[in-house]
Image (tube, rainbow, N blue to C red):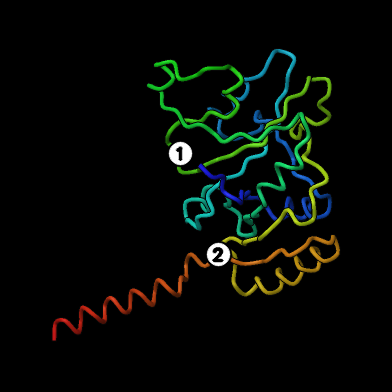
Amino acid sequence: MEKPPSIYRYMQFEHLLDLLSNYRLPLINPSCWEDKNDALSTKLSCKKDEVIGICCFTISGANSIYRWSKMAKNNLCVRVEFDRQLIENNLPDKIKLYEVQYKSKDDLDNGCLQSISDCAFLKSTPYVQEKEIRLVMRCTKDEKTNKKIVGYLEKLPTNTIKNIRFSPFLDREFFPLIRKYLQRQLDDCKWENVTISCSKIFNMIKWKNSLRKAVKKLQENKK
């Protein structure tokens, strides 16, 4: 199966500014995550003297209310679209890219787990619609300089980002102002060919037009 050309990461606006200014993505210690099931599985994947850092993406570009509500609760959250091949080409040996495997309790009971290290990219089946993919880095505990951020994927090429899309919960009156500010940041940091958009999931013009046509057709058939 052909790999999707893009991967997407939802993030808060201040994290986007760090990405643009420093050309990097953080690898987070999962012990800081809210999802304790996920925190446990990643912890179990580690050796005794090891710590793990993970950066999460999705391979799905679907503009769904589920993703915005689950992954980008803040009005100023964004979804950043990355060129997957450029991300992979920039990976140092210590950082790997894995697609998450979704397994049920029955799958685990029936011996689906082949390696303890696989726990780092294992989630339960209710999360399957996330279609998650992860950057994973392992290092010894004495190398960890920050409790939350274990390390970074650094020196991202300035053509790695394709699009920055803002949340549908953002007040539309502020979008032109924010877009202007963000474009200035992109230009100052020399990011290339990045488009800026805002999700229109609450105001889908084509869908509304199709609905009007469908209703009109029903009305005409009744005459």
**Residue 189: x %, y % from top left:** 85, 60
Q: As rendered, which of 30 and 217 lies closer to the eye?
A: 217
Please give the name of the residue rendered at 83% of the width and 46% of the height, measured from the top-left corner: 155
Residue at disc 2, secondary structure: loop
Outermost left residue? 223
Label total for image: 2
Q: Residues within 10 Å of mark 2 (few under 14, many from 20)?
A: some
Under mark 1, the amino acid is Val
Residue at disc 1, secondary structure: helix
> According to the image, label 1 marks what residue?
128
Outermost front residue? 1
Q: As rendered, which of 177 and 5 lies closer to the eye?
A: 5
Q: In this view, does 112 lie to the left or right of 14?
A: left
**Residue 70: x %, y % from top left:** 52, 47
In the picture shown, does residue 104 fall above or below 64? above
Q: Do the residues labelled 1 and 2 touch (CB within 8 Å)?
A: no
Could you tell which of marks 1 and 2 lies nearer the N-terminus? 1
> According to the image, label 2 marks what residue?
199
Q: How crowded is mark 1: few (under 14 residues within 10 Å), some or many (20 or more)?
A: few
User: Could you give the CA–CA distance between mark 1 and mark 2, rounded to whole angstroms?
Assistant: 23 Å
- Quadrant of the image occupied by residue 112: top left
In the picture shown, does residue 14 fall above or below 56? below
**Residue 111: x %, y % from top left:** 44, 15
Q: Is residue 124 left or right of residue 19?
A: left
Under mark 2, the amino acid is Ser
**Residue 117: x %, y % from top left:** 61, 20
Q: As rendered, which of 74 and 81 lies closer to the eye?
A: 81
- Quadrant of the image occupied by residue 190: bottom right
Outermost bottom residue? 223
Please give the name of the residue rendered at 81% of the width and 50% of the height, measured from the top-left corner: 23
Q: As rendered, which of 164 and 170 lies closer to the eye?
A: 164
Please give the name of the residue rendered at 81% of the width and 64% of the height, measured from the top-left corner: 185
